[in-house]
Amino acid sequence: MVGDNVEIGVYRLPKALTLAEELELDLVEISPKASPPVCKILDYKKFLYEQKKREKSLKTKATKVVIKEIRFGPQTDEHDYEFKKKHAEKFLKDGAKLKAFVFFKGRSIVFKEQGQILLLRLAQDLEDIGKVEQMPQLEGKRMIMFIAPKKK
């Protein structure tokens, strides 16, 4: 486009402006902090279009992280545990991260060891399809653990 009939080189600002006007293109400042500032002669609308197109393609390639939550109580019985474990397996197989937490109501905070045992048991049961990203941690009235799906 421009390289066909323009000699590539370093020009002073007035000459670069007249050159851009002659070619009916825009003088665009690429690197203002450089000494001297770097400018390019190009079609600015086409430049903006290509830049938006590049950003859009990068955005579509980016993976979106889905986080699914499973809530337990400190005294969750066996049937409820198995039911929630099946859901956790499904979430991990679908590629979502899992946020498992035990919610302590009122004075049930005294059973925090039971909550930790429950979350570690879940991690052990799911170790073939997911890996623990964050071990159980107590945050206020919740004990939270994150499990990410294993790569295929």
Image (spheres, rainbow, N blue to C red):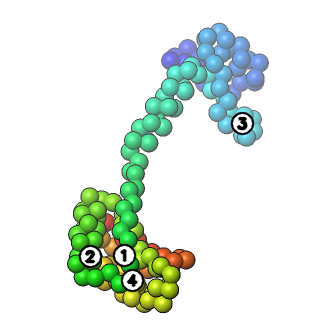
Q: Earlier in the sequence, mark 3 or mark 2?
A: 3
Label 1 to label 3: alpha-carbon separation: 56 Å
- In the rendered image, residue 10, in percent from the top left (x then y), is placed at 69, 27
Label 4 to label 2: alpha-carbon separation: 12 Å
Q: Residues within 10 Å of mark 1 (few under 14, many from 20)?
A: many
Q: Is residue 120 above or below residue 27?
A: below
Q: Which residue is mark 2?
A: 80
Q: Residue at x 48, y 76 (%)?
A: 142
Asked if marks 4 and 1 touch (Cβ < 8 Å), the reply is yes
Quarter holding the C terminus?
bottom left
Which sits in the foreground, 29 or 117? 117
Secondary structure of the residue carrying numbered label 1 = strand
Which sits in the foreground, 102 or 47? 102
Which sits in the foreground, 54 or 76? 76
Q: In the figure, residue 103 lies in which quadrant?
A: bottom left
Q: Amino acid at mark 3?
A: Pro
Does the rendering let one see residue 68? Answer: yes
Q: Amino acid at mark 4?
A: Pro
Q: Mark 3 or mark 4: which is in front? A: 4
Q: Earlier in the sequence, mark 4 or mark 2?
A: 4
Q: In the figure, residue 59 lies in which quadrant?
A: top left
| Residue 62, numbered label | none
Label 3 to label 4: alpha-carbon separation: 60 Å
Q: Residue at x 68, y 33 (%)?
A: 38
Q: Which residue is mark 4?
A: 74
Asked if marks 1 and 2 touch (Cβ < 8 Å), the reply is yes
Q: Which residue is mark 1?
A: 72
Label 1 to label 2: alpha-carbon separation: 9 Å
Label 4 to label 1: alpha-carbon separation: 7 Å
Q: Amino acid at mark 1?
A: Phe
Q: Earlier in the sequence, mark 1 or mark 3?
A: 3
